[in-house]
Amino acid sequence: MNVAQSRGALRWLGGIVLVWLMAPGLAFAADEEASAREIKALRAKIAGSRERLGGAERNERDLLRRIQDLDQDLDALRVQVDRSRQRAAQSAETHARVEADRVASVQRLAKTREAMAQRAVALYRAGVAGPLQVLFASTDLPEMLVRMGSLERLLIHDSELVARSVRETARVGVLEVEAGRARQVSEDAHQRLARRNSVLSAERAARATALEGLRQDQAREHALLAELETASKLLQQTLAKLRAQQASFGNGQFAARKGELLRPVSGLVRRPFGRLVDPQYQTEIFHKGLEIKARRGDPVRAVAPGRVRLAGWFQGYGKLVIVDHGDGYFTVSGHLADVYVQVGDSVGEGDALGTVGDTGSLEGPGLYFEVRRGSGPLNPAEWLAKG
């Protein structure tokens, strides 16, 4: 193939490559448009849930269900933000890879052009008659044939240099277009992520304001505490059923490690186990677990080996995981943002069950944690290692 043919083929190939490069972008744009529509719909649902929680009619029933409805909508919005974060990371990675390819291609082209320049200088110095002088300087026919072979190889080498230069020039052009487009996609993805993070933060702040308004209303606060007590009893009944449904296992290891169990998350206890009195309304409640203040997204870990018996939404506790550690011992982890395990999974000490969130929480991000023997609550502070 001569140089002209090479150029024509490369132009055709370049066009095909550019069309191929645009295809993912079109799919990405369509996906983003669908995502934007879903986020708009979610925001409308969240606003509706918040209004129902605020309740102009001041209805004091089903407050926990309304909080859970709001949390589920917020969780769906958080999932959309997480997807935007993944897309932004992927687009940044693509841009970095394409830019590295472009830089490498520019360097290869520079070396090829340097080699061509050296050959051009050599040809200029040899002049037009240079090749003939090389041939006619032969002393006999065998030497002339050898020199002809060498000249032929040199001409082929020069031709290959020119063709390589054409190919690499075309490649650099394609990569420059691809790198520019990848950079734009990455910038757009990060801008969308920033906007969606802002939306999520605003919706979380609005949730906190709605809950604070609820707690400032004495009648609704009392109604909420009553519902929380009902939710606690339902959890107790659920644990009793779980224990009855499966034969007991274990070898006493959990009980033997009392006071030495791995802490499920790092953080300070903001609400201890035991009988508490609401300072605002002097309402007495019995808190069956610990509320540990922690950063949103921090991993929540299994305190000991066991089997997952429940994983998902539970009214009053948000996203919750119950682990059966054998011999009738269970641990409960609530208010999770993500749940990494499924019912039936075996977990080891330190395995991540999910991440810290605020689902079902009235006090912001943190972990609700219980230790139970059967359905009876135990003081987690007596079982966990000192922090």
Image (cartoon, grey):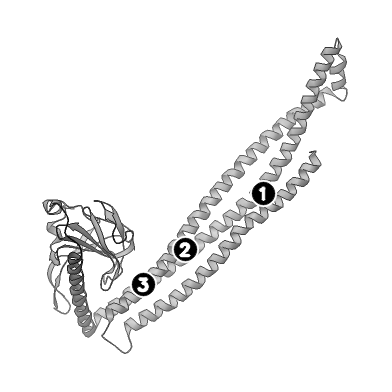
Q: How many marks?
A: 3
Q: Secondary structure at mark 2?
A: helix
For image coordinates 73% across by 46% down, the residue present is: 10
Amino acid type of the residue tagged 2 in the rendering: Ala
For image coordinates 70% across by 45% down, the residue present is: 170
Marks 3 & 1, CB-CB < 8 Å contact: no
Which circle, 3 or 2, is nearer the viewer?
3
Whether residue 299 appears in this view of the structure is: no
Q: Residues within 10 Å of mark 1 (few under 14, many from 20)?
A: some
Task: Tell me the CA gap for discs 3 and 1.
Answer: 46 Å
Which badge, 3 or 2, is on the more N-terminal residue?
Answer: 3
Q: Which mark is residue 294?
A: none
For image coordinates 64% across by 55% down, the residue present is: 20
Q: Measured from the top left, where is residue 164 in percent x and y?
A: 71, 37
Which badge, 3 or 1, is on the more N-terminal residue?
Answer: 3
Q: Tell me if 57 is positioned left or right of 101 in this view.
A: left
For image coordinates 62% across by 59% down, the residue present is: 23
Task: Tell me the CA gap for discs 1 and 2.
Answer: 30 Å
Q: What residue did someone put label 1 on?
A: 174
Task: Tell me the CA gap for discs 3 and 2.
Answer: 22 Å
Q: Residues within 10 Å of mark 3 (few under 14, many from 20)?
A: some
Q: What residue did someone put label 3 on?
A: 72
Q: Residues within 10 Å of mark 2 (few under 14, many from 20)?
A: some
Q: Is residue 63 above or below residue 171?
A: below
Q: What residue did someone put label 2 on?
A: 194
Amino acid type of the residue tagged 1 in the rendering: Val
Q: Relative to the observer, which residue lies in front, 154 or 216?
A: 154
Q: Secondary structure at mark 3?
A: helix
Q: Relative to the observer, which residue lies in front, 349 or 163?
A: 349
